[in-house]
Amino acid sequence: MKTEFNTHGSRGKREAPFSLRLTFEERAKLEDAANGVPLGSYIKAVLFGSGLPKVRRRNTQPVKDHEALGRVLATLGQSRLSANLNQMARAVNTGTLPVHPETGADLRRACSEVHEMRTALLEAFGKDGGAS
């Protein structure tokens, strides 16, 4: 009795992997043609005329403006804005924040700076902040 290994359809097992050596240029061409599809899937689809699988792609450039994002992050890193706003909110909630024109100006300036950072972040990510 003869035993056959790697026969088609035997318990769903696949044949041994097939290796193909390519030059760097050939592989680059192949990857370019595959357009994000795994190379094995692309080669099988081309050879056997089957459809290409759909590839879920992540946005490879989620940041539209890296310079604007850098400015915002630098500003945030140099400021104590969040800590200061938190302290002010706590003081308002406990009734210990004296209300006078200078305090109001500080609050308006802090809110304006937060709004500027929000706008810059939205621009950096290519989003339209709309009117707010």
Image (cartoon, rainbow, N blue to C red):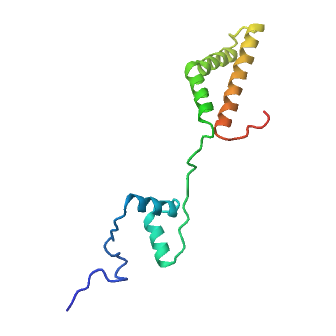
Above/below status of 111 relative to 24: above
Name the quadrant containing residue 107: top right
Name the quadrant containing residue 22: bottom left
- Could you tell me which residue is drawn at 43 percent across and 67 percent down? 40
Q: Residue furthest left?
A: 1
Residue 122: image x %, image y %? Answer: 67, 36
- Could you tell me which residue is drawn at 53 percent across and 67 percent down? 53
Above/below status of 101 relative to 60: above
Q: Nearer the viewer, residue 118 or 104?
A: 118
Q: Nearer the viewer, residue 126 or 76?
A: 126
Residue 60 falls left or right of residue 23: right
- Could you tell me which residue is drawn at 44 percent across and 64 percent down? 39
Which image quadrant: the C terminus? top right
Above/below status of 76 relative to 45: above
Residue 5 falls left or right of residue 118: left
Residue 93: image x %, image y %? Answer: 68, 18
